[in-house]
Image: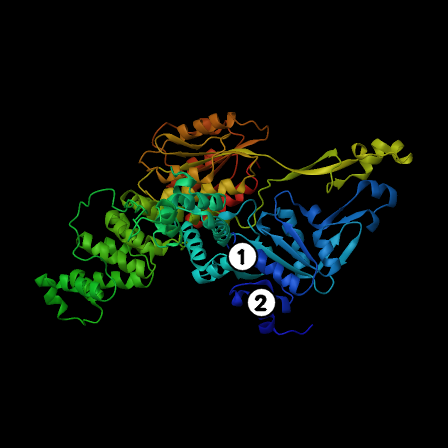
Amino acid sequence: MSWSIDETIEKIKREFKIIARTNELRSILLAKKSNRPILIEGPVGVGKTTLAKAVAKFFNQDFIRVDGDERFDEYKLVGYFEPQLVLKHGWNWKSFVPGPLVRAMINGGILFINEINRLSEGAQNVLIPALDEKIIEIPKLGTIEAKEGFWVIATLNPTEYIGVTPLGEALRDRFIWIKLEYQTFEEEVEIVKIHSKATDEIARFAVTVTRATRRHPDIKRGSSVRGAIDLAELISLSIDHGINEEELVRLAIIALGTKIELVDGTNKAIEDVIREIVENTSSQFTFFRKIERENRFDTRDKIDTVPDIVPSLAKSDDTVDQPNPYPDPSIDQYGEGEDETNAFNNAENNSATKALLLFYPQNDKLLTFFRGLLGYYGARLISEIREGKDIRDTLAQLWAPLDFESIYMLGQEAIKYRNFLALTALAEINPFAIARVLEEHVSDIKNYDNVYLIHLFYLTKNHLSTRKREIFRRTASRIIVKKALKILGSQSRKHGSFKKKTTYRPSLDFDLESTLEISLDKILTNSVNNRDIVCLEKRDKKTAGVIILDISGSMYGEKNVLASIISAMSIYAMSPRDEISIILFADEPLLIKGIRERKPLNKILDEIFDVRPIGFTNISYALKKALKELRKASLKAKKWAILITDGEYNRGGSPLRWAKKFDRLHVIQLGGSTRGTQVCRLLAYSRGKYVKVRNMDELFIAVRKILSYPDK
């Protein structure tokens, strides 16, 4: 088949009324021409399904859709044998019910998998040979080869929306990746006008409101253009009968109430947030205010101006919570142009600094300033920040502490060069100064995935304004989840499985021998029903355990980061039916999650965010608390615990007497002396695995391996 990509793009856009998306369509068609499966990733409502269906309809191919679900296993994807037909015809095509994958392969059609990351791991694994070699093996039937035209399109929501199973690296590697983002304002206006028949002003109002939901601090997931279409349609139908601002708010709540998700922990209702957005937006538009004036006032009244009926929003809480204990710096921000000059001129007010500046070039003013202020180490600081290096060693060698202004200027440079490690080091010295930097730039860094941003959040959160702290908290939570999922990779949430005999249900594995033993008489008389058929149902092993994390010591921030990521790993590595508890401890244990408690991950992270490590280490008390939690477990499976510590206990006496009471106690040692190593080895002796790690990455790998089969 020969066709031009550019001509096809224009035809598809014209025929299916697709606005823009030229580059994305070109990528899809290139993949189609090379017969490579594609993975379209993007937020809900950006048009992933629309593009897939448009391409399928244009090429006039069978379009078979599968919606990802953890219950959609390999049998439902490939197909299954109907037991009664097997008893009648044997193991052949007459008794086989093909699934969507086999139907697409046989017919040379397009298999569209919506939210592929919600499929079970077994279903994901079945796809690999189908994508690779265009073949699939069906037991008792043989090899199925795909006809020409077979193509797979899959969609994937961003990582923070993952519902069940992370997409395995082996499967992801088979796809060509296409990223869809929200479209521009003007493009969304055109989409709304096409699908709602709204006027230009109403379409612009609807798009403005929905786009505002995507950046509101109280909204976790904003509305897509679908919300704008619904809102514009409702306004268009209502405006002929008269509409005021209160009615506008009501229509927005109806249109958007199901399309947005508030951040966890906010004390606002969806209605209040939508009202705030509409009231803040409506002042920019006049279509409803004209109607309102006509409705409110008699036409005989002479009114020259329309009263301002839109209340302005109260000033948001953007002030820093705590008073500045340091002198206010004379510059607002080190950057470009006039502010940079002010920073340099202020430095020149110091006569000693001014004398030193005469010996150095003036083209790099910041470097010259710090070289004059701190000599060699000043120049080294600036160079290391710009090169993305760790500046802790250099900071430790300074002959005098840095003041507020200097740390603020260095923080601005670290933000400019995205050196979050250096920014963290500066926050450890003066969190208030770096909090001021973050106040100005938190919106710029919220899309980065650097782990040091989590540490930075712990250090500065108490000095940020309420609004900026909430934005930063969401950023830190997102990074923690993405880091945990990346570490886990394609690890299954199943800790082993077993097959249990059960009565027949479609797609279950049919046990012919057991059925013959039980129902032979009925088979011979052709009177078998579903209750007489024995099937094998694969079930996951359930498990119950405790994660015990040592957060004692002075590493505030770093140990909280470890606790956050490991907690996220444990939640994502476990099945929802598993029972798991999380305990942090120092001098006393702190129960973050009870073993039978159904607490969402964001609540767990919020509690860890507020924990401050202290100096003493009481392993005995922590193990005692863990045993108490394990006794609350309702599962009869073998109980386990993972202890992460340096082994250097200094409170509560020897923990060995408590360790002997565990079925399985795995110990991961991070740091510690020879004494700590001896303690950790004895704690794990004959009861579980002992692993000593040197750094954060090794720790995460060790946790991942143990979580695979924690009861072994």
Q: Residues within 10 Å of mark 1 (few under 14, many from 20)?
A: some
Report how many numbered discs are placed on residues in the image. Answer: 2
**Residue 375 image point, x, y percent:** 18, 63
Of marks 1 and 2, which one's residue comes earlier in the chain?
2
Residue 195: numbered disc: 1
Drawn side of residue 44 relative to residue 406, left or right = right
Residue shown at the point (14%, 71%) measured from the top left: 359
Q: 648 or 98: which is nearer to us?
A: 98
Q: Residues within 10 Å of mark 2 (few under 14, many from 20)?
A: few
Q: 104 or 590: which is nearer to us?
A: 104
Q: Kindly identify the amino acid type of the residue bearing the numbered disc 1.
A: His
Q: Is residue 228 above or below residue 631?
A: below
Q: Nearer the viewer, mark 1 or mark 2?
A: 1
Residue shown at the point (60%, 65%) measured from the top left: 15
Question: Which quadrant holds the C terminus?
Answer: top right
**Residue 306 image point, x, y percent:** 31, 51
Residue 14: numbered disc: 2
As drawn, which residue projects farthest toward the right? 525
**Residue 200 image point, x, y percent:** 45, 60
